[in-house]
Amino acid sequence: MASQLYIGSRTVDITPQLPVAVTGQFHLRIAEIAETPLIATVMVLETRGAEGDLAIMVSCDALYIPTDLVALVRQAVKKQLPDIDENKIFLNATHTHTAPVLALDGEYLIPKTGVTQVKDYRKFFVEKISAAIVGAYHDRSPGSVAWGMSYAVAGYNRRIVYADGTSGMSSKTNLPEFRSLEGSEDHDVNTLFFWNDQNKLISIVVGVASPSQEVEGRYAVNADYWHPVREGIKEKYGKDVNVLGWAAAAGDITPHIRYRKEADDRMRNLRNLSRTEELARRIILAVDESYDAVATERHSELVFKHQVEELPLPERWVTEKNYLEAKAFVTNAKEQIAEDPKAADALYRMMNWQERTVKRYEKQLDNPKPMYPMDLHVIRLGDIAICTNEFELFSDFGIRMMARSKALQTFVIQLTGSSDWGSYLPTQRAVNGGAYSAIIHSNIVGPVGGQVLVDRTVEVIDQLWDKEVK
């Protein structure tokens, strides 16, 4: 079943024209400066012949990737490469909170003049990324891959449990009522290294269970810690090396330290590093450790399979209480905005956020078992598995997948498309505790759907390994 691997890779600048509205907070922010470029990195993997397959993976400096935008990228690529299966393309977001708005459905009331419009940035985004995909596809040549794993503390569980059983999100721990962190932390740094047939390193994949939101509140365009990660890797491994950033399951994870911050800051200051630079230092050390161990264990002929399916997940049920509270909030917000239009800067996104809950409840009246259709990609690349989901997936779900997988090493990639600005998918413990990331407005799919996602992902992985045995 082993076949020669063909590889193509490109990096493209997707920095917007300024000023531009950036997303990741409830209030409107207009960025006047770009502190770092925003990057999209393309990786094309292919084997040929009767057992051949294809995967086109794009890592984007973005908060989320709307599913309708993924469809537009696929359509644009299909026009230029009519013989490919465009469904083998997926895009993931690094989840930086200082990237442009990509959703067309009224996330904010953005000024009509003097600011790059969402439709214009989307057009630019599709053109740039589709061109990079086509270029990487034409660049395909025989190559080899090695996989590695090390560790770096780049994310911390941000769900805080208190004595009364409630949870907070990124809330205080220096209180008598603090009891524990609610969920897991995943410090794995999963890596893939790709060489061309001239033995030149051309691309590195880095998977980290931490969203890129260290500088999340700024009125600026910024790729967050992925920028110094990429720059540091290029400085050591070559300026032409393309770096793909994959965010593993990290819906309840943050790069912000939840306790012992003063001690951590002291060490960072002694190194004369910013927080993004410190995170990059840790991640690059993990990359270096993996590279040093696996660089001579390269695979040019290997099993490569890419399965794509639409997975229906049961939506989280909206109660009548949820509905009435959301409807009251929406009514009140509309009244405030009507009285003072400037109030929309702070209220409009939250109003729409809760209005979606109202609409979900009304849809349930006609369809009491609503399902959310999610594109699931599962890839076998030699001994490793790659699996995707569209959510800010709580870390426990990712760990369940990795623990049960038959693969030697399993890469989980979250936020590969989203129809809801990047919906969280929480555990039952989180729902019981409450707080922003586990309440109904933040969750299209709840814990039941999360387990369905885990079970089906593991089932597909197992099938890809069982086929070899048979």
Image (cartoon, rainbow, N blue to C red):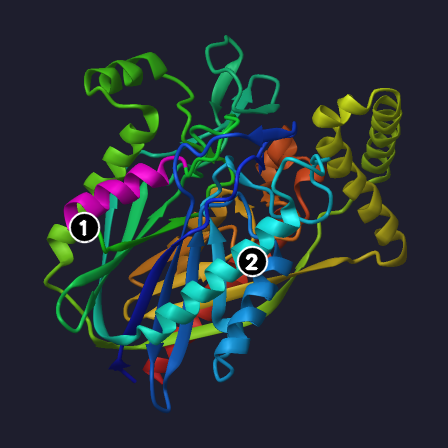
Is residue 227 part of the magenta span, yes or no? Answer: yes
- Return the residue nearer the eye: 162 or 379: 379
Q: Is residue 98 left or right of residue 302?
A: right
Q: Quadrant of residue 192?
A: bottom left
Q: State the CA–CA distance, disc 2 to disc 1.
A: 30 Å
Q: Nearer the viewer, mark 2 or mark 1?
A: 1
Residue neighbourhood size for the residue with mark 1, other residues' Cα within 10 Å, grouped as few (<14), some (14–19), many (≥20): many
Q: What kind of residue is marked 1?
A: Ser
Helix, strand or loop at label 1? It is helix
Position in image of residue 240 (x %, y %): 23, 55
- In this picture, which residue range is highlighted in magenta? 224-238
The residue that disc 1 covers is 290
Q: Quadrant of residue 379?
A: bottom left
Q: Main secondary structure of the magenta part?
A: helix
Residue neighbourhood size for the residue with mark 2, other residues' Cα within 10 Å, grouped as few (<14), some (14–19), many (≥20): many
The residue that disc 2 covers is 453
Q: Is residue 324 above or below residue 51?
A: above
Residue 446 visible in the current orientation: no
Position in image of residue 184 (x %, y %): 43, 37
Please tell me which residue is depicted at 52% across the width and 50% down the height of the picture: 415
Position in image of residue 87 (x %, y %): 53, 72
Please tell me which residue is depicted at 60% across the width and 58% down the height of the picture: 69
Q: Is residue 333 above or below residue 208?
A: above
Residue 102 visible in the current orientation: yes
Please tell me which residue is depicted at 48% across the width and 35% down the height of the picture: 221
Q: Is residue 113 left or right of residue 94?
A: right
